[in-house]
Amino acid sequence: MVERVKTGIPGMDEILYGGIPKRNIVLLAGGPGTGKTIFGQQYLWNGLQMGEPGIYVALEEHPVQVRINMRQFGWDVRKYEQEGLFAIVDAFTGGIGEAAKRERYVVRDPTDVGLFIDTLKEAIRDTGAVRGVIDSVSTLYLTKPAVARSIVMMLKRVLSGMGVTTILVSQVSVTERGFGGPGVEHAADGIIRLDLDEIGGELKRSLIVWKMRGTKHSMRRHPFEITDKGIIVYHNKVLKITRGGISEVTLGEE
């Protein structure tokens, strides 16, 4: 039997036939506003509710803002941080500013990959993390696309080796249909793509699992919503995008 980590996101585990295979490194790709960060934070919060420690690596946002954003969904992680079950790795501030001085795990120079990895390992060891989110991995290699694959492979060796099932958030432009570069796509065990399509004057959110090593998964495009409690995936519905517009089909009624 494949050991799995349940995302806990309504509808998502059904699409993955029970969850993400343990130790997998999953690329969560999408354009701006698609819900990547919320997905990652919800995955970590649900883990904490199941007694599974986690780490969140903040590369694009101040850790203080991360906590505020999570609290808006009712996910208050401060208690878990105090208990040593959750950590935010600050790879954003470089330790500059008063608030940053109060952070426990700070990457002084986010462009120094060795330093970044060392801080990551420390946070994982201290918390006993089995779930991780890096938001966003694109920040690590945007200036040096040639090293994208080697950075992701290095992260994979460390995270998977330490038993962490990880989501790597990957930024893509709205029009780009890829996942964040060929090097990254091939290094990842799984790829989930989130989309926000404007057709016929209406925005529709949907996701599709492009690959997931170690498990079968739905091959369909499923609609999802972002609510005040987080993401809900409609695993029993399929979003069909045609020239005539968008249609939602409930499975079994096709």
Image (cartoon, grey):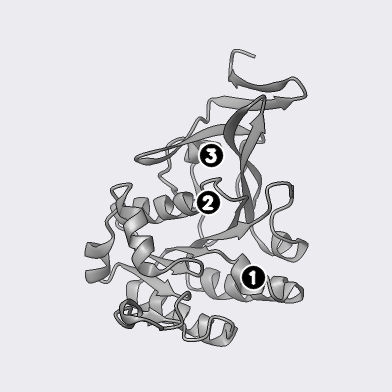
**Residue tagged by mark 3?**
17
Q: Earlier in the sequence, mark 3 or mark 1?
A: 3
Tell me whether the residue at label 3 lies in contact with that at label 1, contact meaning CB atoms closer than 8 angstroms. no
Which residue is found at the position 27% from the left and 71% from the top? 84
Which residue is found at the position 41% from the left and 69% from the top? 62
Which residue is found at the position 67% from the left and 36% from the top? 219
Q: Is residue 253 left or right of residue 18?
A: right
Front residue (pair 151, 60): 60
Which residue is found at the position 54% from the left and 47% from the top? 33
Q: If the image is split into quadrants, where does the C terminus sit? A: top right
**Residue tagged by mark 2?**
36
Which image quarter: residue 100? bottom left
Front residue (pair 223, 167): 223
Instruction: Identify the secondary structure beneath mark 3.
Output: loop
Q: CA distance from mark 2 to mark 1?
A: 18 Å
Q: Position of residue 108 (x, y in %)?
A: 47, 86
> Is residue 247 visible to us here?
yes
Amino acid residing under circle 3: Tyr
Query: Given this view, does label 2 or label 3 mark the residue nearer the observer?
Result: 2
Q: CA distance from mark 3 to mark 1?
A: 26 Å
Amino acid residing under circle 2: Lys
Instruction: Identify the secondary structure beneath mark 2.
Output: helix
Q: Is residue 2 above or below residue 122?
A: above
Q: CA distance from mark 2 to mark 3?
A: 21 Å
**Residue tagged by mark 1?**
152
Q: Earlier in the sequence, mark 2 or mark 3?
A: 3
Q: Position of residue 248 (x, y in %)?
A: 60, 21
Which image quarter: residue 203? top right
Q: Is residue 155 above or below residue 33?
A: below
Tell me whether the residue at label 2 lies in contact with that at label 1, contact meaning CB atoms closer than 8 angstroms. no
Q: Is residue 26 left or right of residue 91?
A: right
